[in-house]
Amino acid sequence: MKDGFVRVAAVTPGIRVADPRYNADRVIEGIDAAAAKGAGIIVFPEMVLSGYTCGDLLLQHRLIDACKDGLKTIAEYTSDLDVLVFVGLPYYFRDKLYSVAAAVHRGLCLGIVPKTFIPAYSEFYETRYFTSGNASVLTTDFFGTGIPFGTHIIFENGESLPDLKIACEICEDAWVPAPPSIVHAMAGADVIVNLSASDEVIGKDAYRRQLIASASATRVAAYVYASAGAGESSQDLVFGGHDIIAENGQILAESELFSEGVITADIDVERLMAERRRMNTFTENVYDDYVRIPFLINPRTVDIKRNVPPLPFVPSDNAERKARCEQISDIQAMGLAKRLEHTGLHNAIVGLSGGLDSTLALLVTVRAFDRLGLDRAGIHAVTMPGFGTTGRTYDNAVNLAKTLGCDLMEVDIKKSVTQHMEDIGADINEHDVTYENAQARERTQILMDIANKKAGLVIGTGDMSELALGWATYNGDHMSMYGVNAGVPKTLVRHLVSYYASEAEEDGKSELAATLKDVLDTPVSPELLPPENGEISQKTEDIVGPYELHDFFLYYMLRFGFSPSKIYRLACMAHRGSYDGETILKWMKIFYKRFFSQQFKRSCLPDGPKVGTVAVSPRGDLRMPSDASAELWMTELEDIVLS
């Protein structure tokens, strides 16, 4: 499937206990239903052909033989289907009975994986019937054909999805301290399937959900869990058919309890591979005793069945977003507090424009001072009106400093910049890059000199999105003594300021809350060009593009190393209804061009706290050469067909 996506399914059919022929028909119906939904990998519950609750009937050859016949029927049915199916059944091998997962594909049974851990506690008494599987892969006869039998088997897809490697564990295997899937993952498996028969008792569903999500996270894998349904309920046991599909800690799909049917989800194998490459502590292919069985599926391309958030840095859930903002605020404040404590300085200098970034920087500085027990009067908020400053941003800057109890300083830069332009022979009426950057550098010089005078630190205000795009004046707003916003993307800056506004409102600080809300409503602008009719004339997103798109591109490029074509596909899904394909592609080209050409600015960034899994610091996450070519990426962008 294109871009590393493959659709998987967990199926709980309605079966009859001890009726393999009937159950084989139900499995076939389940295969059809899952295949109709586009699934390429289909997983059924443990012992689905016999039923888990057969009890001593498992000692009857008639039942075991019928299950094997049913498996043959199912295998033959897949002859013309583009699927790999895992079916659970009891299976005799060398005079012992095993609970196994059989993989069938294109009319063949490819291999049989036995259960490793056999429970005999509480309601379980499997040791009465079953033997534990062995890591050694042997050969079993399946209607005249020798096929692999053992736990150390990985099923590997061929040309269309070369990274798709699947391994099995069965029910109890997932609940023990050292599950087989740990070794499977270290041997290269990126998808774990679990054929289960897990009965229901109060609270078990929540624990099971947590267990499967955690298993997928620690293995850096996808995990497909199919469990026995209500048709297996008998005597003291009730089964709920709780099917779960997870990927690297995230639940992608989940069935309702006490239901039967099919759940599907699209797993991103390429994303898993990117994560494993990034984690040098994740050791793959350290086991050479695995038998690797090839198969080949080419699932048809369908719309991706997974949620792609338009703002990957911002949680959509209100409670989670609030918790994220609280944590980020603490990280920012703690980083700054440590720097102040280490240097022994009790003064901080913040250039306050009345915009989002400088507002957040001031709020973080106040939080750090409060944590250290320092007087807020040691925070020197410096407003520096220039040619583009509007009354709205000026008033907001003044109000913020006053309501927060900081020292307010005002230095008008128009006279000094005019003199500077004259000194270097530049026309003050020509509103070019020199005109803009002269203002930014003048402001930085003022802040640095005040810091020297006050024995304090200049607090950087620029955010990570601006650094990614190079939307900062080199040695102007690009420079500081500690950049508190350097790890925060623009889309998250807005929510952080909103969080502070809500906190102020709850604390009864209505004036501060009102000012913060007006800052949030103000267009993002460097305010370096003269206003028009008193309003901001220079809007950043009209020039470099929407930050919600740039942050999306940045996240998937740096976090997973995705190609431009895949990021474009995801962006079209995530921003459907907001931006068309042509607009997304236009700004993607701007993003890649600027990202590569502006690395030299990021190569000499001041210190600043890392707050998330994506960062651009040259000392940590992004050790990128300043002069790398963007040709590979730009060429792929040119070849993209508009969605």
Image (cartoon, grey):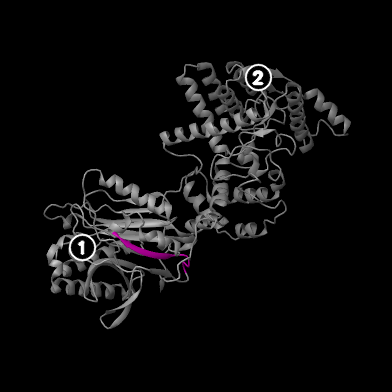
In the picture, measured across the screen, residue 227 lies left or right of residue 620, that is: left
The picture places residue 75, in percent across and down from the top left corner, at 28, 73
Depth check, mark 2 against mark 1: the one in front is 1
Q: Is residue 143 magenta?
A: no
Under tag 1, what secondary structure?
helix
**What is the number of callouts on the image?**
2
Q: Residue furthest bottom?
A: 144
Q: Residue at position x 51%, y 26% from top?
A: 500
Q: Position of residue 80 (x, y in %)?
A: 33, 74
Amino acid type at mark 1: Thr
Q: Which range of residues does the magenta coloring cover?
A: 160-170
What residue is shown at x 60% (from left), y 37% (from top)? 609
User: Does 104 appear above or below 235?
Assistant: below
Q: Report whether residue 228 is seen.
A: yes
Residue at x 19% of width, y 56% of height: 124
Q: Nearer the viewer, residue 515 or 237?
A: 237
Packing grade of label 2 (10 A; few <14, some 14-19, many >=20) is some
Instruction: Decide: few, some or many residues near mark 1? Use Cα within 10 Å; few <14, some 14-19, many ≥20.
Output: few
Q: Tell me which numbered mark, 2 or 1, is placed earlier along the sequence.
A: 1
- Can you identify the residue that label 2 sits on? 378
Assign a secondary structure to mark 2: helix
Q: Is residue 636 above or below residue 605?
A: below
Read off the residue under disc 1.
127
Q: 153 or 505, which is in the foreground?
A: 153
- For residue 18, the mark is none
Q: Quadrant of the N terminus?
A: bottom left
538 on left or right of 247 = right
